[in-house]
Image (tube, rainbow, N blue to C red):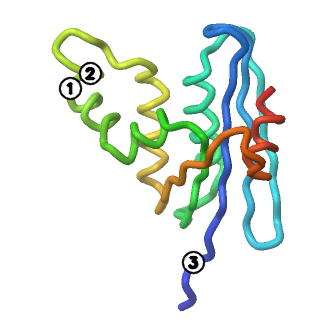
Amino acid sequence: MSEKKIVYAYSDGSSIGNPGPGGYGVVLKFSDSVKELSKGFIKTTNNRMELLGAIIALETLKGNQKVILSTDSQYVINGIEKGWAKKWRDNGWMRNKKDKALNPDMWSRLLDVVDQHDVKFIWVKGHSGHEENEKCDQLAN
C-alpha cells in the first residue's frame, strides 16, 4: 500500500475594524490540483476569520488526509499546538476561573476537524511574499 500524499493547505483571515467586515481565504494544493475558497461577512473579527479559514480548509477535504496547513495566525497555531483550545474546552470554554475563552464555536469546529485528519500546522510570516499566503490574503479581502 502506498503512503498518503500530502495536501498542502493555506489559510488567512481578515477584518477591517475588529469587529467589522471581513472574510477568509483558502488555497488547497494536492498533486496538480489547486482549489481556492473564500467568503466575506458583514460583521466579524480577524481571529474568527483566521479560525474559519483553517476550519474550511480542513472541512473541505474528504476522508482522512495528511495535511500541512500554513497560516500567519499564531492565535490558530498556538490554540492547537500548545493545547490551549483543548484545555479551554475541557474547562467549559473558560481560559481561567474568571475569563471565558473567545470564539468557542469556532475552536470546537477546528478541534473536531483536526481530529479527522493528520494535520501539521506551520506558521508563515504574513505580508512577506509567501506566494500562497499572499493569495489567501487577497482572497480574504
Q: Nearer the viewer, residue 32 or 64?
A: 32
- Please report the residue visible at 73 percent of the width from the left and 67 percent of the height from the top: 30
Residue at disc 2, secondary structure: loop
Of marks 2 and 3, which one's residue comes earlier in the chain? 3
Q: Residue at x 69, y 18 (%)?
A: 15
Residue sticking out furthest to the front: 128
Cα distance between the residues tagged 1 and 3: 35 Å
| Residue 90 against residue 119 in the figure, above or below | above
Q: Which residue is mark 2?
A: 95
The x and y percentages for residue 90 are 22, 32
Judged left or right of residue 63, residue 114 is left
- Identity, as a three-letter code, of the amino acid under mark 3: Lys
Quick check: marks 1 and 2 in contact, CB under 8 Å?
Answer: yes
Number of residue marks = 3
Please state the horizontal and vertical placement of residue 105, each as a whole percent of the image.
Answer: 45, 24
Q: Nearer the viewer, residue 74 or 114?
A: 74
Name the residue carrying label 3.
4
Q: Secondary structure at mark 1?
A: loop
Residue 77 rendering spot, x and y as whole percentages:
46, 43
In the figure, is residue 134 to the left or right of 78? right
Q: Secondary structure at mark 3?
A: loop
Query: Which residue position holds label 1?
Result: 91
